[in-house]
Image: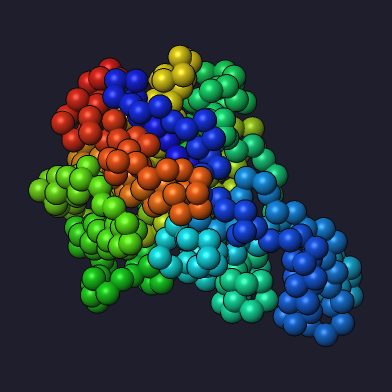
Amino acid sequence: MTPDTAPDTAVSAPEPDYAELARPGESRKDPEHLRGRLQEWLRSILEAGADPEVNSVEVPAANGMSNETVLFSASWTEAGQRTEHRLVARIAPAESAVPLFPTYDLDRQYQVMRAVAEHSPVPVPRVYWSETSAEPLGGAFFVMERLDGDVPPDVMPYTFGSWLSEASPEDRGRLQDASVRVLADLHAIDEPERHFAVLRSADHDAQDPLDAATALRAHVREQRDYYAWATADGPRSPLIEQAFDWIEANLPQPSGAAVLCWGDSRIGNIMYRDFEPAAVLDWEMAALGPRELDLGWMIYLHRFFDDLAALAGLPGLPDFLRPADVVAEYRDHTGHDATDLEFYTLYAALRHAVVMFRVQSRAIAFGQAPTPADPDEMILHRGSLAAMLDGTYWSGIGAQL
């Protein structure tokens, strides 16, 4: 995820290099060292006579804040034929990197992606292997195929000027509708509590099927636990705690069964070809829960990028991913009328605030940012979260939920 900022109505100016905060250099891996380790590992898992060779390794300069991404190509012999493969390894970070999350279950992501591919038409990269030992690369990892396509950029945000903002309204509309269709297809997976049992928590008990209300309560408890972990050795945020109080006081009771939620359901995690999804990426936040978890996150994340454009005096994309349009498109595909979007978009803002608080804590730990006198300044979108809490955010931007 990428740090965002607040609307023009209530905002603190972002740091110019906010995208690089808390990406400590010491967490990066040396490409040549990685090449040797990957080749040795492939020899240990492939059949005798495969003779694997890792030909190139690239560690992207803008590597992720939650785990390391390594791009590599390799060849090996299978069924008597020499085959070439373009691959990606996602590696859990070391403790010395001050991780963004308390645990990194890369095997769970691997299992989720494999099950999505098996039980839905949603395009996900083929996953090859999951390695739970940290010995080969210094952290658990999984390997998936590397695909090509266009991704709406985070830096600079796609609302600042990009292939998406420069596209025709018709093409943006196709991309928007196709992105909402991804959520509809994921939520249509039958018996998600069975196919994605790896996502069930102790709070889910043995319900089968798991109901959405129980799943939502468990999700909120997990977010509170995450906040407690993120602030265990540092300051706490009065604004975040106020938002958690609001969430508890306004918790809805969604009806029906829980569905598979992608979790980080934003267009910046989709690779497109000709404005259609070619690969749906980043499954570390996948969960079982109500449909609106994904809908609220998709709406909210676009609002942050558009708020940032407004702050910079740019036109942005105010007619893109509007709440009413997202809800209508989702209804067309599913027959489901989304409810309580004020709650779910605010909950998304709160969840993102906890992540950003941890991001800034990492930046402070690595000497990339000073410790502010007011801990709430560590939330880059504090203004919009506060506006959501006092009920003025959506009217302030001329939108309705």
Which of the 4 quarters of the picture holds residue 374? top left
Q: What's the residue at 51%, 25% (across, down)?
A: 159
Q: Nearer the viewer, residue 391 or 113?
A: 391
Q: Nearer the viewer, residue 157 or 171?
A: 157
Q: Is residue 290 left or right of residue 253?
A: right
Q: Position of residue 398 (x, y in %)?
A: 28, 17
Is 195 rendered above or below residue 313? below
Q: Residue furthest left?
A: 249
Is 133 rendered above or below residue 158? below
Question: How many numbered tags mark residues here?
Answer: 0
Q: Position of residue 113 (x, y in %)?
A: 53, 61
Q: What's the residue at 80%, 71% (across, down)?
A: 36
The figure's colour scheme reads: rainbow
Does any portion of residue 380 appear in the rendered image? yes
Q: Nearer the viewer, residue 190 or 186?
A: 186
Q: What's the residue at 41%, 72% (across, down)?
A: 198
Q: Position of residue 111 (x, y in %)?
A: 51, 69
Q: Nearer the viewer, residue 112 or 358?
A: 358
Is 132 rendered above or below residue 89? below
The quadrant in which the C terminus is found is top left
Q: What's the residue at 32%, 57% (across, down)?
A: 234
Q: Residue furthest bottom?
A: 48
Q: Is residue 347 left or right of residue 372?
A: left
Q: Position of residue 245 (x, y in %)?
A: 14, 49
Does any portion of residue 115 appear in the rendered image? no
